[in-house]
Image (cartoon, coloured by chain):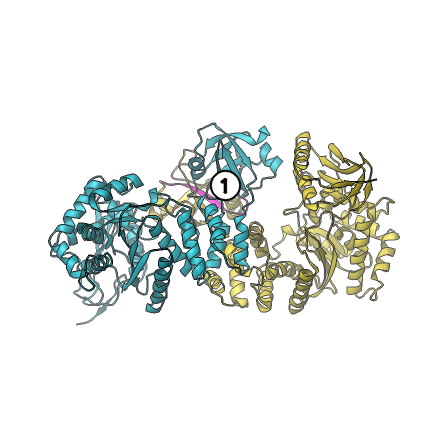
Chain colours: A cyan, B yellow
Amino acid sequence: MAFDRLPARRAGIDTYQQPVVYLRSDCPVCRAEGFEAQAQVEVVAGHRHVLAILNHVTSDWLRSDEIALSEAAWSLLGVAEGEAVAVRHPPQLDSLAHLRTKVHGGKLGYEALRALMEDVSHGRVSDIHLASFVTVCAGGGLDFDETVALTKAMVDVGERIDWGTSPVMDKHCIGGLPGNRTTLLVVPIVAACGITMPKTSSRAITSAAGTADAMETLAPVALDVPAMRRVVEREGGCIVWGGTTRISPADDLLIRVERPLSLDSEGLLVASILSKKAAVGSQRVLIDLPVGPQTKVRSAQAAGRLSRSLVSVGAALGLQVRTVLTDGSQPVGRGIGPALEAIDVMAVLERMPDAPADLRERALELAGLVLEMAGRAVTGSGRTMARQILDEGRALAKFISICEAQGGLRIPPSAAHVHVVAAPATGVVQAIDTRLLSRAAKLAGAPRDPAAGATLHVRHRDRVELGQPLYTLHAESPGALRYALDFTRSQLPVAPVKAGP
Amino acid sequence: MAFDRLPARRAGIDTYQQPVVYLRSDCPVCRAEGFEAQAQVEVVAGHRHVLAILNHVTSDWLRSDEIALSEAAWSLLGVAEGEAVAVRHPPQLDSLAHLRTKVHGGKLGYEALRALMEDVSHGRVSDIHLASFVTVCAGGGLDFDETVALTKAMVDVGERIDWGTSPVMDKHCIGGLPGNRTTLLVVPIVAACGITMPKTSSRAITSAAGTADAMETLAPVALDVPAMRRVVEREGGCIVWGGTTRISPADDLLIRVERPLSLDSEGLLVASILSKKAAVGSQRVLIDLPVGPQTKVRSAQAAGRLSRSLVSVGAALGLQVRTVLTDGSQPVGRGIGPALEAIDVMAVLERMPDAPADLRERALELAGLVLEMAGRAVTGSGRTMARQILDEGRALAKFISICEAQGGLRIPPSAAHVHVVAAPATGVVQAIDTRLLSRAAKLAGAPRDPAAGATLHVRHRDRVELGQPLYTLHAESPGALRYALDFTRSQLPVAPVKAGP
């Protein structure tokens, strides 16, 4: 049937990760196959195939004997302009029967979850089916056995790194706290002791900066696995962006739907974290759980439940997991935004007198625990060892070596436009609205503009004088600065001051 | 802020009911607001606003100072070419908190479901949130009280018709059986007795023809409520397409997601059916439940459970509901496709000797029950009364009058190209594969080409001679005919014949 083969055109439309193809509604293949707009179709070129959503074109920019592809479809299919592409009804997905089983109250084992994650990781499962899966996993929708099976399945459908050594250490923070860039301090402290700590980090998803964004203002982070291996063999540690690898690929696609649904699922969260750790070859993992009114985990009780699940599911996967609850009531350090957070980190590494003490203390606590988990320090002495390494300049030296090995140390950029917001009265800072401040940093351009963001000059309960700086907004254009300012003026104060003597 | 106002362009891209807007990724509003591809945005023109998915354009067909709209966005917003349009972050939907409550195991009352259906009916709820809602409603996810509350909420967010008379009769078939066009016979029989029966029907969603598609080959069906009221005042009955009204509008949007998820939810099914009936002002409703291996309801047990739910939820809404289980093992009548089904109906109305007996018998049974429910016939005598009305030609006369009132009786079209599939051997027909036959009818062009489809010349267990016609395919083009034929040849036989003496 030759009528269903059409020359491909690049539409130049970015539909994010959702592949879309464009066909004239009067084209022969639409009429013959009865393809409706928004139908799911399989697009085939040579041995490659991709599931896409069909959009009908009614105007003249496309002829009825050609097919246009969105950016995601174009790159997944890897076609050249004019190459013949076939369009057909998508194959029935057997794994969706497992989804229906779960929706109707059944339990899923490894084989079923593996089949489902296989289809998810290859982009064969539509967003509405992903939403259905996330919904049935919400709250305690996955029991212990299912969480273990899902985690294994997520690991097994992707690549897996083996470092050929032991122990391989890792740390992770269950996000939500701006400025909490302890990774950039823990890795060099631990690696300076000769312990292996290959760290993959993410870019910002909803925040003003991810660890990879902050690190990128200091060194290249988009390293593939062989390059990452060379850095780790030389320096013992690295801090790279995890997005270049196919590590637990199903997770990224689930997150795309989890985020707008904003449904918390303990099982999905545990599987998401631990599958990435297992796949990158980590063996012992310290997990930082900031607890506060605006973080992901909002009570000690919830943190305790999540901790137990992380430890027990980790054990079932052969991962030694330890958790630590930390204060999540206000941002850590001063900067919010890639470069501003990197500057805080460098101040701590360089032992500057005005380096943020809270960032230093948190990093020392976590690094100490990692040293204890690695068997390098006896229980209770890890923090002291970490402080020595930092204070002797060995962490700074190791960090510089890691940056050089990743492609060269850089100086973080600074913003062209700043505006200082001053205290409206003499008094005491009543609170720091972490979420508002983070939003202002994003409106100022972070993380897209790496120098953009905010710096906080006061902490909760500080005494301030009238006119004393509370925080500064940084932007790379006057428009972005104005936009962030307009936003903060339209809201409740980021750092309300209660007037007093 | 003027930078977020852009002149609108019609993109000429049909994304079905999902509004999409196209912006250059480098346009000021994307940069300032941080809009990512696939983000949900609110698009505003004057007092109208619509939620849309954002696609980034990277090629030259759009300038960075303009915005293009998909067909759905264009018509919902009602703008003119070049008119200024604003784009902004969508408002937080409070009703999504109710969805989360339900996902986490809570029960929803009328107010919560009303708020949710209000947002659904205005297109403010994304497909992934709809998928989440459908998932939590799957199986027995809605209890009796929730089903009643949901049905009321679905009625209350749309228009409602009051006929100012009593009783107002209705019938409904829980689909899945090709050719089951009893509505076109029941309405004229009942209306010929002077009983009010204003029938709204749907077009095909996944089948080769809906009742409205078949009726449309005989008379106009796209009547608005005032036109429908004029027909009913004159003739007592009508058979129109329900899609021109805002009757239970949330239902249509839920169905868009229910279909690909293929999750059965008794509560959603009951709410969908009864909300439409209550909203069109029906008071007493007969519901036909064909039970068979390929219909929606597959066992007498499932039919019994669904019946009890329909009757009890109906009672809570003030609707008198009666259900009748019918044979769903093979198609009804001979034709499959809009015109071919209409031809069967006309043969019964005209009392032709070769009129399909099964269609006639089913229609008389249902019409008899409606006459009994209306209090016009005593229990057990409805069928006899219905037969008299049909055999005296009063049903035909009433049907013609209804067609004239709706805009004029038409003669159904016939297809330009037909192909007869003959028995490969002498023997007995083992089965009729309803689903395959229906698919062949669709590939031949039904329902888009109203004359296209299939006619079945044999029934299950018929004896046939070698070469005797089994079924005929009808198409309006040689290509469509060939396509349907290729399909049937690639599959198991539609009507397998077991050879015998």
Is residue B288 or residue A451 the one in the foreground?
B288
Q: Is B81 rendered above or below residue B118? A: above
Look at the image and tell me whether residue B361 can be seen. Answer: yes
Compared across the picture, whether A183 is left or right of A11 comes to: left
Tell whether position B18 is magenta: yes
Q: Quadrant of residue B250?
A: bottom right
**Residue B65 location, x and y as percent?**
38, 39
Q: Residue at x 27, y 39 (%)?
A: A227
Residue type at tag 1? Leu
Is residue B495 or residue A333 the one in the foreground?
B495
**Residue A168 location, x and y as percent?**
27, 51
Position of the C terminus of chain B by quadrant: top right
**Residue B392 location, x and y as percent?**
89, 53
The residue stretch that appears in magenta: B15-25
User: Which chain is home to disc 1?
Assistant: A
Is residue B13 or residue A324 the one in the foreground?
A324
Which residue corresponds to mark 1?
A51
Compared across the picture, whether A217 is left or right of B300 comes to: left
